[in-house]
Amino acid sequence: MHLSSVNHCIPLSDGNSIPIIGLGTYSEPASTPKGTCATSVKIAIDMGYRHIDGAYLYQNEHEVGEAIREKIAQGKVRREDIFYCGKLWATHLDPERVRPALERTLKNLQLDYVDLYIIEIPMALKPGDDFYPKDENGKWLYHKSNLCATWEVECHPYFTQPKLLKFCQKHDIVIVAYSPLGTCRDPSWVNVSAPPLLKDPFLNALGKKYNKTAAQIVLRFNIQRGVVVIPKSFNPERIKENFQIFDFSFTEEEMKDIEALNKNIRYVELLMWRDHPEYPFHDEY
Ligand code: A2P
């Protein structure tokens, strides 16, 4: 598979295709200045990104839509050049809530369609407008659901998912790796006892060889094995850096060496929901 900065879509079984790198847009809503998301998406599109990963939960879909529409109006891209992935949040998993949730996303974006719509987490929470519902004692309010759903997969050199990847490749299923950089170090939802991926000595040494950063090394590793990556950054330099992964490639031996770094470390364990009946990470994959 030859991937380049202008041509890096990989085919899906239904005849559609997905750009192998997307811009992640999650940022803590309270501490992110208004407009940062829109600016970042515009920079990313100018840089060559064609895939934007967003969600209603992130509370910035209106900014993502504004940026995409502006770039279309400028003639930089057409709608069909952009791949937008939206997500159904846990409080909307009841079948009758799905369509209204999607329609709200489209209204926020002011676009006619999304390219992909996935279940954000496979554990239902009490339906309603509160994203994180709890009772008066602070106990999480879970909800029963009937899930036969696809599920995004954390994937990076400390969590390489060999078994899942093999299964998906056998069945022509494309994996999208969330947290491909090992995510941020927010202790409220990230397992910060795990060592930071981008500080890994081997990845940094390999970076020196190719004149690349550890972030570029881990992103290249995944795209070289056909896994879609959605690194989040609202920093213009890093948005650019994360896209500069098409001008080098690893030898087979280097791919194996990176694969050998696997520690089965999951940064996004969501331990606060580990007693949810549908908690997904008790299972092997
Ligand atoms: P920022 O938005 O300030 O760039 P993930 O995509 O694995 O969830 O990781 C996202 C986190 O990694 C964010 O905190 C983001 O911060 C940071 N990040 C994004 N790109 C890079 C990079 N090239 N080098 C170091 N950190 C990065």
Image: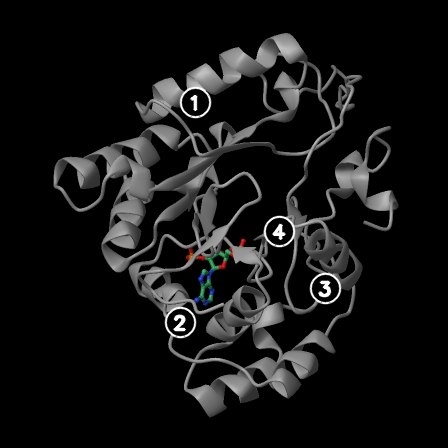
Between marks 2 and 4, how big is the CA–CA gap?
A: 19 Å
Who comes first in sequence, dot 2 or dot 4? 4
At which x and y percent is residue 106?
A: 39, 21
Viewer-nearest of labels 1 and 3?
Answer: 1
Do tag 4 and tag 3 residues touch (Cβ < 8 Å)?
no
Q: Position of residue 223 (x, y in %)?
A: 53, 65
Q: Kindly report the distance in space between the C-alpha atoms of the residues bearing marks 1 and 2.
A: 32 Å
What amino acid is labelled 3 in the image?
A: Ala
Q: Residue 226 location, x and y as percent? A: 57, 62
Q: Point out which mark residue 175 bears.
A: 4
Residue at the disc numbered 1: 105
Kind of residue indicated by mark 2: Phe
Q: CA distance from mark 1 to mark 3?
A: 34 Å
The amino acid on which the numbered mark 4 sits, given as a three-letter code, is: Ile
- Measured as percent of width and height from the top left, residue 56 is found at 48, 27
Q: Secondary structure at mark 2?
A: loop
Which amino acid is tagged 1? Answer: Thr
Give whichever of discs 2 and 3 has the lower sequence position: 3
Label of residue 194 in the image: 3
Asked whether, in this view, residue 145 is left or right of residue 43, the answer is right
Do the residues under discs 2 and 3 have CB atoms within 8 angstroms?
no
Residue 110 in the image: above or below residue 264: above
Which element type, helix, strand or loop, lies under badge 3? loop
Residue corresponding to mark 2? 246
Q: Residue furthest top?
A: 96
- Quarter of the image for residue 261 reads bottom right
Tell me if residue 34 can be seen: no
